[in-house]
Amino acid sequence: MRVRSIRDMAAAVRGRRTDLTLSQAELARRAGVSRKWISEFEAGKSTAEFGLVIRVLEELGLVLDLISGEDAAATLPATVVDLDALLDQYRVR
């Protein structure tokens, strides 16, 4: 999944959390952050502390890979996925 903004990251986290049927409170407890922090992060708060974001990703079993744009283009699968549509499924409306 290509993440281009904090809102994209927040949508992915929210989607994974709900897929795992975790409440915000349960994820917060497991990751060692407050439920309020999870709520604000999932709402796209742009000042979320990176270290805490990494802890939440780890708790959800998500991995963050950084690659260059050229490398990303070279490794695109033959099947195209509409990431905007996928992210829209998880965004708060």
Image: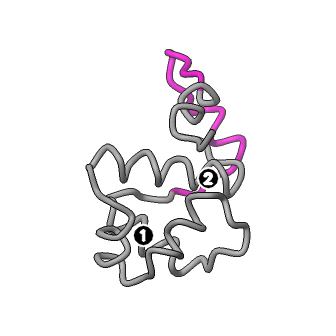
As measured in the structure, the alpha-carbon distance from the residue carrying label 2 to the one carrying label 1 is 21 Å
- Looking at the rendered structure, the kind of residue marked 1 is Val
What SS does tag 1 mark?
helix
Chief SS of the magenta region: loop
| Nearest the eye: 60 or 71 | 60
Q: Residue at x 45, y 81 (%)?
A: 34
Residue 71 on the magenta segment: yes
- Looking at the rendered structure, the kind of residue marked 2 is Ile
| Nearest the eye: 82 or 34 | 34
Against 43, residue 76 (above or below) is above
What percent of the width, then of the height, locates residue 20?
27, 49
Marking on residue 67: 2
Q: Residue at x 42, y 69 (%)?
A: 56
Q: Quadrant of the C terminus?
A: top right
Total numbered circles: 2
Q: Which residue is situated farthest in the top direction here? A: 79
| Nearest the eye: 23 or 48 | 23
Q: Which residue is mark 1?
A: 56
Against 80, residue 20 (above or below) is below
- The answer to whether the residue labelled 2 contacts the one labelled 1, judged by CB atoms less than 8 Å apart, is no
- Graded by Cα atoms within 10 Å as few (under 14), some (14 to 19) or many (20 or more), the crowding at tag 2 reads few
Against 89, residue 5 (above or below) is below
